[in-house]
Amino acid sequence: MQEELIDQVEYFCYYPGNVSCTKEGRTASASLLLYVLAGVSIVVTLCGNLVVIISISHFNQLHTPTNLLVLSLAIGDFLIGVLIMPIIAIQSIETCWYFGEVFCYIYTFFLALLTTTSIITLAVIAIDRYIAICHPLTYSNKITVQIGAMAVAAIWTSNVTYSGTMILSGGNTEGVIGVDPCPGDCTLVFNSAWATIDLIYSFLLPVFIMVTLYAKIFLIAKRHAKAISTQQRNSVGKNKNISKKSERKAAKTLGIVVTVFILCFLPFYVCTLLNQFMNFAVPSVVAWTCCWIAYVNSGLNPIIYALFYPWFRKSFKLLITCKICSPESSLISLMSEH
């Protein structure tokens, strides 16, 4: 009889005000495995973004408008790894909220702020690259480091305003994104109006911008490569091969940028659509899985936006060998000479 009572306690979450919620039962080995996987994801997110933050902040050669946006993205994703992912790990594995009501409001604010900031920054990076590739003269003459800093400030300011307005106006009081919490749980949920606004602002609009601009970049790059190939038709065959190789590399990189982002966030927003707009109760296991897939994107961003840059590998070597601590290391050239 005593064992039955213990089992019953283990499978319920208890909150103030005599509120109790059913807790999903998991074996100790399953919980341990989930914590290990979550821990690996958090470490990868923290380390990858920290390398980007240190590299761009330290080396003078990397102080460019584009890299300021990449730095902002890395800072947002790093904070997700510090403030959001550990809490989500505990909440999704234990299926209970242990941190109280006040911390819940703080947590949901930063959850909305950092997630939206990362997504919007990706869209602004797409705009930056479109101008740089498709309008190079305008970019070199008008897009300065100061403009990049202003863009970063505008992104963070607008998203602080957006997230704060949503939380303070009670936008997260009705409806559920993929889960069915009891009154003591802490879940970022939206009423119908804010669900529509958030879907457009945090997903549909950024995706539209990214896909449209990267498609235009790809088409223009392809035309340029074709023109160069035609001009070099009678030149050494090596140059022609280099042109084709560059075209393939550009197509691959742009494809990774768009595809990974959409694949990571699409399942989460599909759950949102099913639950809030179609009245379909998504199982909690599926909802948490979609949520984790979305946050894995924060760990992949350093790979997509930094690992493919030649300077990243060199700065990483300088970092792990501690040569970055040497005098005047900030003046080291990281760019290829050819």
Image (cartoon, helix red, strand yellow):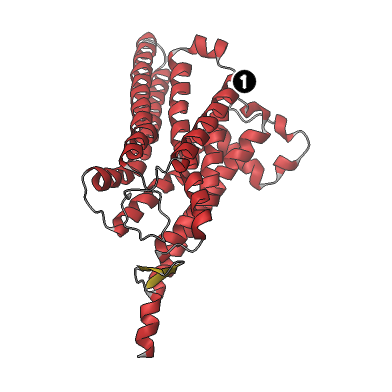
Q: Residue at x 40, y 78 (%)?
A: 9
Secondary-structure class at tag 1: helix
From this viewpoint, is residue 40 visible? Answer: no
Q: Nearer the viewer, residue 254 or 35?
A: 35
Q: Nearer the viewer, residue 179 or 65?
A: 179
The N terminus: image quadrant: bottom left
From the viewer's perspective, is 46 left or right of 176?
A: right
Residue 253 is at least partly visible in this image: yes
Instruction: Specify the farthest residue to the bottom.
Output: 1
Count of labels shown? 1
Amino acid type assigned to the residue bearing label 1 in the image: Gln
Residue placed most toward the observer, 109 or 63: 109
> Counting other residues with Cα less than 10 Å from the Cα at mark 1, is it few (<14), some (14-19), or many (20 or more)?
few
Rendered view: 279 above or below 230: below
Work out which residue is located at the far right of the displayed protein and give it.
327
Tell me: 99 left or right of 315: left
At 37% from the left edge and 74% from the top edge, which residue is drawn? 11
Q: Give percent across and percent down for residue 118.
A: 47, 37
- Of 320 and 112, the residue lying toward us: 112
Q: Which residue is mark 1?
A: 146
| Position of 27 relative to 292 (above/below) | below
| Residue 294 in the image, given as x and y percentages of width and height | 39, 46
Q: Quadrant of residue 2?
A: bottom left
In the rendered image, residue 311, in percent from the top left (x then y), is placed at 58, 33
Image vertical order of residue 265 relative to residue 224, above or below: below
Query: Which of the image's four quarters has the C terminus?
Result: top right
